[in-house]
């Protein structure tokens, strides 16, 4: 998958499946982490970033729109994946090495805009449960990982296949981490890597290619919630011509 994404010489019909898969991984991993944190860990509802809570899996989103818009919006796809992954959060496993290879080693400018939108969706949602890190974003990402993710450093090197029965007999790949064991750490790692992507987007001016989509409103509001990471807004929305929407959403809040 990673090789297909990296090889820009491949025809889009060959790269697209890999690109689609990485979007799904980013959204589903973030969704599973958020749901597990809310459902199974000791999180006081009145301490979750200004009392913002996520809708239940079966609730209708307040950002739902007509069928035509939904069918054309990647944001609707994100919502569908979110609901599916949230229901399986207790048994979910993440591969942070995949996050690192796509969010750090690949340039956002060489990937479709949907990749950046997927990262923004994940970052804005994770920031509600894992506020802060704004002061740590100035530390190079590899240095941050060495300091904060040392206990899982072995997962950042691909396991060498031993044979056809790898993973058989209930054995886990060394690159996977169980959400039930490492939820908080995985949330922190995901957020730091996602901040790196958004910083790259800002430096390259890629956000100028974005246009307003109503279903982006959810991510915008969640980005507003964490006042410790207000820079997230300046990274994500400075050139979307959202001034009117921005103040309207502030009014709603």
Image (tube, rainbow, N blue to C red):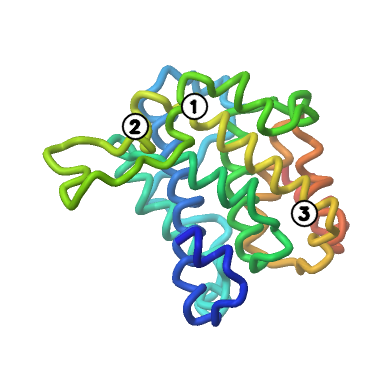
Sequence-wise first label, 2 or 1: 1
Closer to the camera in the image, 26 or 139: 139
Residue 178 disc label: 2
Sequence-wise first label, 1 or 3: 1
Residue 71 lies left or right of residue 116; in this view the side is left
In this rendering, the answer to whether 20 lies above or below 253 is: below
The label nearer to you, 2 versus 1, is: 1
The image shows residue 75 at horizontal and vertical percentages of: 56, 63
Q: Which residue is mark 1?
A: 153
| Residue ID at (74%, 31%) | 140
For the question of whether residue 198 can be seen, the reply is yes
Secondary structure under tag 3 reads helix
Secondary structure under tag 1 reads helix
Residue 201 disc label: 3
Closer to the camera in the image, 216 or 245: 216
The image shows residue 55 at horizontal and vertical percentages of: 47, 44
The image shows residue 74 at horizontal and vertical percentages of: 56, 67
What is the distance, in whole Å, between disc 1 and disc 3 at their CAs? 27 Å
| Residue ID at (21%, 43%) | 167
Residue 107 lies left or right of residue 64; in this view the side is right
In this rendering, the answer to whether 161 lies above or below 46 is: below
For the question of whether residue 34 can be seen, the reply is no
Residue 40 lies left or right of residue 105; in this view the side is left
What is the distance, in whole Å, between disc 2 and disc 1 at their CAs? 15 Å
Q: Quadrant of the C terminus?
A: top right
Residue 107 lies left or right of residue 31; in this view the side is right
What is the distance, in whole Å, between disc 3 and disc 2 at their CAs? 30 Å
Q: Quadrant of the N terminus?
A: bottom left
The label nearer to you, 1 versus 3, is: 1
């Amino acid at each position: 998958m990673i090789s297909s994404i990296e090889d820009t010489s491949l025809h889009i019909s060959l790269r697209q499946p890999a690109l689609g898969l990485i979007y799904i991984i980013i959204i589903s991993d973030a969704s599973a982490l958020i749901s597990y944190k809310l459902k199974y860990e000791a999180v006081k509802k009145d301490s979750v970033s200004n009392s913002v809570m996520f809708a239940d899996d079966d609730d209708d989103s307040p950002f739902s729109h007509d069928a035509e818009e939904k069918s054309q919006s990647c944001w609707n796809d994100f919502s569908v994946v979110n609901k599916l992954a949230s229901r399986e959060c207790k048994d979910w496993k993440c591969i942070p090495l995949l996050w690192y290879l796509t969010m750090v080693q690949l340039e956002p400018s060489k990937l479709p805009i949907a990749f950046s939108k997927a990262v923004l969706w994940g970052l804005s949602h994770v920031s509600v449960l894992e506020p802060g890190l704004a002061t740590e974003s100035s530390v190079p990402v590899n240095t941050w990982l060495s300091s904060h993710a040392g206990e899982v450093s072995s997962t950042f090197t691909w396991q060498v296949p031993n044979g056809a029965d790898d993973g058989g007999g209930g054995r886990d790949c060394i690159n996977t981490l169980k959400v039930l064991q490492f939820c908080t750490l995985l949330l922190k790692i995901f957020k730091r890597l996602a901040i790196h992507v958004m910083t790259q987007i800002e430096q390259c001016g890629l956000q100028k290619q974005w246009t307003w989509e109503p279903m982006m409103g959810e991510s915008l509001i969640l980005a507003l919630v964490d006042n410790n990471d207000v820079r997230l807004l300046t990274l994500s929305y400075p050139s979307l011509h959202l001034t009117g929407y921005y103040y309207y959403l502030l009014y709603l809040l």
